[in-house]
Amino acid sequence: MKPELKKQVKEIALQELKKGKKPEEVFNDAISAGAKKEEIVAIMEEFMNENLPVAFIPLIKDFLRKKTDLYKKEQKISSEKSKIWDPIDEDVRPALFERDLNELNKKYNAYKKHPNSIRFIFFLSLIPLIALVPMVLYGINNDFNFFDKQDRGWLFLLLIPFIPSVCYKQRISATQKDLAKLMIAKENNWTYSPKEKLSRWKLFKKKFPEIFNAGTKNRSIQDEFWGIFRHGTQKRFFYMSTFTFVSDLTMVRSLITREKVYQEIFIIKLDKKLRSDFRLESRYNFYKERPKEIETESAFLSDRFDIFYNGKRADKELDIFMTLSPSVQVRIIQIIKRQKPTVIQFKEDMVLFAFKPTESDYMKTNFLRKVKVDQRDVNKIKKRFDDMLNIASEIIPFLD
């Protein structure tokens, strides 16, 4: 508000107060005239520092107290509405990811505005490959054996020109996937963050050490979704992400190879706390069979999964069987047959599922041809979400 206008508003407000109007009435009149709430409250606060008639001071004090209490209440309600359930109890709000998503949208709009720039940069990345042709012809003409130990340096040089084009193509592919997932999040009013986060992995490792302590390096959480889905008349919270890590595999003759592993994580929140914390872990994750202390009533489940828990068997067995009722076991078997989870963990008021990704890396979307997200890619990712939410809908009634 400009100083001249502010002065006029103050004079009018003071006149109205002197006529006997209450501060609340003056406030409402000013709002009706087009003034902003915070500007009128600020003027009322300034009145407290001026030589007003003594009779006005208690009225204005009471008005400001009410407005302050109301503002705090509105802020609290707004804060509670915007806060999202998070399995590791972080303060997660959509506003925290606006910058990342705006950058993603900005990149997409830039691609749409200048589609030829993608093709041009990709062509530039192919120049080293084009330059490779005379090198290969030279090697062939001089009887080079690229796989011979003496000439192996040439083999390394032959691989270098592929790096720019492969890296650029991977970058474009990642953007295409992120955009398809963002479209699904917007359509369902879910919160989405595509960024890799080491800090989030550390918190998950603290909460679920048995799962997130896997691998030897480069561990992170990415492609996180927070949302609500309906089960009957009730609303349920869920969380989904991708956990990535590098695992060292010991091969024959003590040679060590490294493998990048992806795990889809899906967590649902229950209405009540479970009787005991434990997990079912696929026996195919290990090279050797281990003796089992607790076996389920289902031979199918016992043959494929081991039960892990902390504490003594005598203290835990009854609680575990109370959770793994026959109805729950039937649903778990159905889930195993359809989705093949590697781990199912029951912890506090949550159920966590870890899956090997089934989503194919191949996408119909190709920005090199046309800068547009193919609806078939969106539908494919959406189907995966539907499968996960169906899992939740099937098992929740028997756990709450």
Image (tube, rainbow, N blue to C red):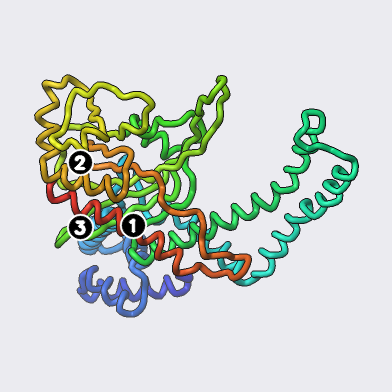
Q: Is residue 58 above or below residue 134?
A: below
Amino acid found under the numbered disc labelled 1: Phe
For the residues carrying marks 1 and 3, which lies nearer the camera in this image? 1
In the image, is 338 to the left or to the right of 100?
left
Helix, strand or loop under label 3: strand
Q: Earlier in the sequence, mark 1 or mark 3?
A: 3
Mark 2 or mark 1, which is nearer the start of the sequence?
2
Q: Is residue 290 left or right of residue 202?
A: left
Asked which quadrant contains residue 192, the reply is bottom left
Three-letter residue code for mark 3: Lys
Report the side of 259 relative to 359 (left or right). right
Residue 375 against residue 190 in the figure, above or below: below
Helix, strand or loop at mark 1: helix
What number is the disc on residue 40? Answer: none
Q: Vertically, is 38 above or below 334?
A: below
Q: Which residue corresponds to mark 3?
A: 235
Quarter in which the N terminus is drawn: bottom left
Can you give x and y, in whole percent of width and height, for residue 64 in the image? 26, 59
Label 2: element kind: loop
Residue 139: percent from left, percent from top = 86, 42
Q: Where's residue 94, x and y in %? A: 38, 56
Q: Is residue 113 above or below residue 97?
A: below
* Quarter where residue 312 is shown: top left
Q: Is residue 211 visible?
A: yes
Distance of label 1 from label 2 (alpha carbons)? 21 Å
Identify the residue position indicated by label 2 in the image. Answer: 349
Image marks 2 and 3: residues in contact by CB distance under 8 Å? no
Residue bearing mark 1 = 385
Between 171 and 101, the one lying in front of the other is 171
